Amino acid sequence: MSERIDDLLQETIATGTIPEGATETERAEMQGLLEAMGLVVEARSHVGQEAAASMPTARARFQHHVAASQPTRGRITIDAISRPRMLPWGRLLPRGLTMALAGSGAAIGVLALAAVVLWQTTLNDPQSAYAQVVEPGDYVQVEGVIEANAQGQLSVQSALGDLDVEAQLATLMGADPVRGVPGLKPGDRVLISGIAGKGRELVAQTVAVSEERPERPPRVISFRQLRRLQAALEGDVVTFTISNDGSRGAVLIEAEDGNQYLVPVDGESAARLLEQASTALGERVRVVEESNVTSGAFTLELPAEPGTDDRLELVNVRGEITNAAVGPAPAQAGVPDILLTVQTLRGPVDVRVPETARSLVGRSGLTAGPRVLARAVGHTVSITGGIDAGSGQVVADALVLGPKVERPATR
Amino acid sequence: MRDHEVMHDARIEGDAAVEALARRAAAREASAWGEIFELHYRAIFAFVRYRLRGADEAEDIAAQVFEVAYSRADRFDFRGAPIQAWLLGIARNLLRDHAKKLGRRGIPDELDELNAPAEPDAAAAVDLRHDLSTAMRSLTADQQEVIVMRFLLDKSVVETAELMSRSEDAVKNLQRRALAAMLRALAEAGYPGAVGT
């Protein structure tokens, strides 16, 4: 009997019609089962859309995993940055020489030479430095100078090369709130806190602005062997990134010798830097060891206290999370913000956490995930962000969760 | 990975291109893994989606599947199982581990709203997906799997039987019991389209 019903159902699914031989009872059962099946099929396109939407981030994560798992030999793991140093024979090759020599025995040597030049040119290129460090979805802090502002679409020259910054919805700090983002002008020095998108696009969450001209323009980038130098490498953070899942990061540091070095760091170091300094830029760090040989990530030693010199800063809120709630539904379709209450030394502070903010589990012992803030009440937190000019509310860009606050047991 | 093993897999999948892909994957060639990701990510995402609480978790688990697969490339025996079956096996294990972790931690549901769809959508469709998620979670693991294979991934009975290591008759029986259980769960949730049997 069971087999008959199973076969009837399969035939019904395959043909779209209930077989004529089915009894009334069987027909009724088939109808119900088809309804259930129809509901699942109906959801198929939605799952497809979700899969397609999630694919870029998942792809970037997987690519990073594959790259990090490749054997170290032959892989570019060192990205020291200094003034460009072209090999002299790079300039000696007259245009067309390669073609002229093609077919001769010397062509092999020239092609090899050209390959070396090309390789070095790639490494010397800040654009490739960006590609090696920043992946879509990463949280990024970078400083730069505005080159152009087309209705909130900023072109920014930074140490990682030219960036396209979408700033229309960003929280502004240090700028004329009336003029807002359109008031930003070429030459303004900006600190951008945001999320990396496709290509070289950065979606700014907060833009801190100073109208002062920078002391020096961002440097052009070249590369050196970092491993040989890492023992003595110490400098100020110029650019900071941390991945969406908090597993890896990178810092661009400016050392005493005037060179800038791009250092891949482990996720724990990156989270600690953000937790301690909030505005990672300007912090003095030391590259102390390579913590993970296979991934090529280094560990950072941080200063005992965050730096206090005059520099662009983002808002920092530290304390204990005493409440986490889902905010009101947004006017347009979208995910509601999370509203946190943080007990600081100066009293409770309300913080709005938009969907785009990065929540890093740090040393909290919590497991990363979309619902981590629901479990974070009672934990310490260090929040980086800006202040919404309209509401005066702190808007989080990135959060680093800390351990749960221990209280003496009450009798 | 020995050559004859790779060749055997190619016969099973019936495609010479798969043979080459498998060979490159076994050698951990990054481009081969890029192709595998493009070919199978959507299916793996769909496979895990309704057994998790939201798209973010599904993305996380689906991404982990490929990371684990890549890490174990040298241990993968291509004989007797297509690449997707291997990936689905990894997904099964990750889902099981994930469920255990959640169970141990007693994850609260207060922030379920976070998993609401981001795009504008008809309320009925949102209700359906929410009810469908709830209904799916009331099924056994095998029932969930057959529903996903047959109606989300659009696998045939033969393909489902192979991927689940069951007979075709067992798959037909399982799909009927799964649909009946789902119908009951949807009716209990008050979904208007489900009348129960």
Image (spheres, coloured by chain):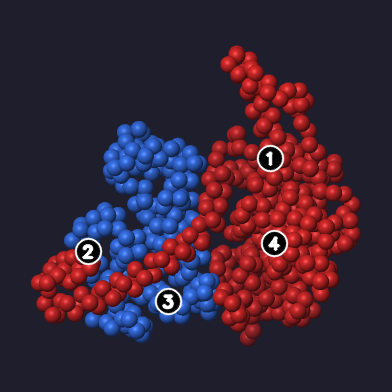
Give the labeled residue for mark 1: A78
Q: CA distance from mark 1 to mark 4?
A: 30 Å
The mark lying in front, picked from 1 and 3, is 3
Question: Badge 2, how many Cα within 10 Å: few under 14, some, many 20+?
Answer: few
- Picture quarter containing residue A351? bottom right
**What hue represents chain B?**
blue
Q: Secondary structure at mark 1?
A: loop
Circles 3 and 4: CB atoms closer than 8 Å: no
Residue type at mark 3 is Ala
The chain under label 2 reads: A
Give the labeled residue for mark 4: A166
Q: CA distance from mark 3 to mark 4?
A: 32 Å
Residue type at mark 4 is Glu
**What hue represents chain A?**
red
- Picture quarter containing residue B172? bottom left
Question: Badge 4, how many Cα within 10 Å: few under 14, some, many 20+?
Answer: many
The mark lying in front, picked from 1 and 4, is 4
Mark sitting on residue A66 = none
Q: CA distance from mark 1 to mark 3?
A: 50 Å
Q: CA distance from mark 4 to mark 2?
A: 50 Å
Mark sitting on residue B125 = 3
Q: Position of residue A125 (x, y in %)?
A: 72, 40
Task: Locate residue B130 relative to residue A407 in the image: left or right.
Answer: left
Give the labeled residue for mark 2: A14
Question: Badge 1, how many Cα within 10 Å: few under 14, some, many 20+?
Answer: some
- Picture quarter containing residue A72? top right
Q: Are marks 3 and 2 on the same chain?
A: no
Q: CA distance from mark 1 to mark 2?
A: 58 Å
